[in-house]
Amino acid sequence: MLLISGRVQGVGFRWFAEREAQARDVCGYARNLADGRVEVLAQADAETLRSFFETLYRGPRASRVEDIQKMAVEVDEALPRFHVRF
């Protein structure tokens, strides 16, 4: 799981994450948090996740990623294709 800080809400970050994840067959979700961060839960093989995370560090053009905290979570085989949560 990633907790992404900076200018990441109101700039299309979740939709950007969804497009990039679906292009790589990453499962999981992106959602806004009340404190202004975006939470991203992603599952895929290690190389796919590395590529996906590198893209999230850049973010969409209007965003400014200041920090990304990574946390390990258990694999959930039932997790659906990547989507935006509200």
Image: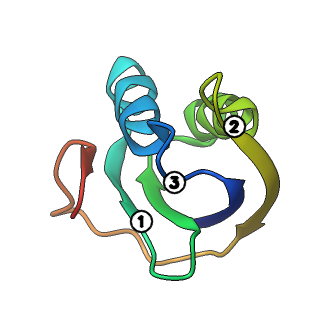
Which residue bears the numbered disc 2? Answer: 50
Q: Which mark is residue 32?
A: 1
Say which of 39 and 60 sits in front: 60
Residue located 36% across and 25% down the image: 19
Q: CA distance from mark 1 to mark 2?
A: 22 Å
Q: Tell me where residue 10 appears, x and y as whole percent.
A: 47, 47
The C terminus lies in quadrant: bottom left
Q: CA distance from mark 3 to mark 2?
A: 23 Å
**Dot 1 crowding, Cα within 10 Å, few <14, some 14–19, many 20+:** many
Which residue bears the numbered disc 3? Answer: 9
Q: Tell me where residue 59 appears, x and y as whole percent.
A: 65, 33
Furthest residue to the right?
66
Q: CA distance from mark 3 to mark 1?
A: 7 Å
Kindly identify the amino acid type of the residue bearing the numbered disc 2. Arg
Kindly identify the amino acid type of the residue bearing the numbered disc 1. Asn
Give the structural element (helix, strand or loop) at label 3. Answer: loop
Say which of 84 and 34 sits in front: 34
Q: Tell me where residue 15 appears, x and y as whole percent.
A: 36, 35
Q: Is residue 1 visible?
A: no
Mark 3 vs 2, N-terminal side: 3
Q: Is residue 41 visible?
A: yes
Q: Would residue 81 appear left or right of 58 to someone viewing this image?
A: left
Give the structural element (helix, strand or loop) at label 2. Answer: helix
